Amino acid sequence: MGQKVNPIGLRLGIVKGWESNWYGGKNFETKLVEDDKIRKYINARLQKASISKIYIERTLKLVTVTINTARPGLIIGKAGQEVDKLKEELKKITNKEVQINISEIKRPELDAVLIAQTIAKQIEGRMFYRRAVKTAIASTIRAGADGIKVSISGRIGGAEMARTEHFKEGSTPLHTLRADIDYSHAEAHTTYGRLGVKVWICRGLVYGKKDLFQSAVESKEVKSTPNKRMGRGGDFGSQRRRKSNQ
């Protein structure tokens, strides 16, 4: 049953980090349930905001929620009004001060959650499932992914018997732990029943150490870090060239 393992859970602590970062002690279950309520509430309230992941960090008096989204403008609103409303609503759930960080997804074509949601919505909109899948695969490969795999299961096309169809392009090494595999699943609600959509995306191999707790830090640094053109050796390569020119 090795093929049934969730590729994100298998890589936790290796190339994947946790979406909830806090210490709960013996009474951790109340915080865990609260995290689930926060995620369900945000996803239900902001269905059109193309939300991928929601990271939650806790201190004694503060809950920090970092939302990864492809459409940050919908969450922030005019002059930040929408995000202020959301902050007040989350305070009622947590009974603590809430800080919300918005992190924009630069390349949504490489995000498995958004790809699965897009395919499901297109199927619900009566687009032929093969066309929806092939369009998603082509855009993901163009964006620079090493590979993508998609499976659709259920009464495909309104068939009497349920079946599963698989689509694959490129390399998706699920047994290679240093492979950065993003995985997600979504449901398409059609007139003839539910269809399950699963997406695996390989974004390359990770070498060396990776920061597994980059949720809140990343959201603050995305806007402040200038786009520097690196040499093949990163900063060291650019410094070496400057010294040789002198």
Image (cartoon, rainbow, N blue to C red):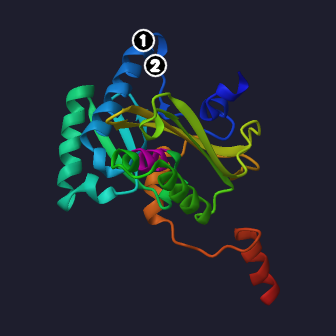
Residues tagged 2 and 1 counted as in contact (Cβ below 8 A): yes
**Between residues 96 and 120, which one lies in front from this camera angle?**
120
Please give the range of residues in magenta.
113-120
Q: What is the distance, in whole Å, between disc 2 and disc 1 at their CAs?
A: 6 Å
Residue drawn at 79 percent across, 89 percent down: 245
Q: Taking 95 as reference, is 49 left or right?
A: right
Q: Is residue 224 visible?
A: yes
Q: Provide the secondary structure element on which disc 1 rests.
A: helix
Magenta residue check for 101 = no
Specify the quadrant that holds the C terminus.
Answer: bottom right
Mark number, residue 139: none
Crowdedness near tag 2: few (<14), some (14–19) or many (≥20) residues, C-alpha within 10 Å = few
Q: Is residue 202 visible?
A: no
Query: Of the residues shown, which amino acid type is indicated by label 2?
Result: Gly
Q: Taking 214 as reference, is 76 left or right?
A: left
Residue drawn at 32 percent across, 31 percent down: 40
Q: Taking 192 as reference, is 130 left or right?
A: right
Crowdedness near tag 1: few (<14), some (14–19) or many (≥20) residues, C-alpha within 10 Å = few
Horizontal and vertical percent position of residue 55 = 44, 39
**Principal secondary structure, stretch drawn in magenta:** helix
Residue drawn at 53 percent across, 46 percent down: 214
Q: Is residue 72 placed above or below 176 in the rendered structure?
A: below
Q: Provide the secondary structure element on which disc 2 rests.
A: loop
Q: Quadrant of residue 104?
A: bottom left
Q: Is residue 207 placed above or below 96 in the rendered structure?
A: below
Q: Which residue is mark 2?
A: 24
Residue furthest out toward the top: 26
Q: Is residue 64 placed above or below 204 in the rendered structure?
A: above
Residue drawn at 42 percent across, 45 percent down: 117
Q: Which residue is mark 1?
A: 27
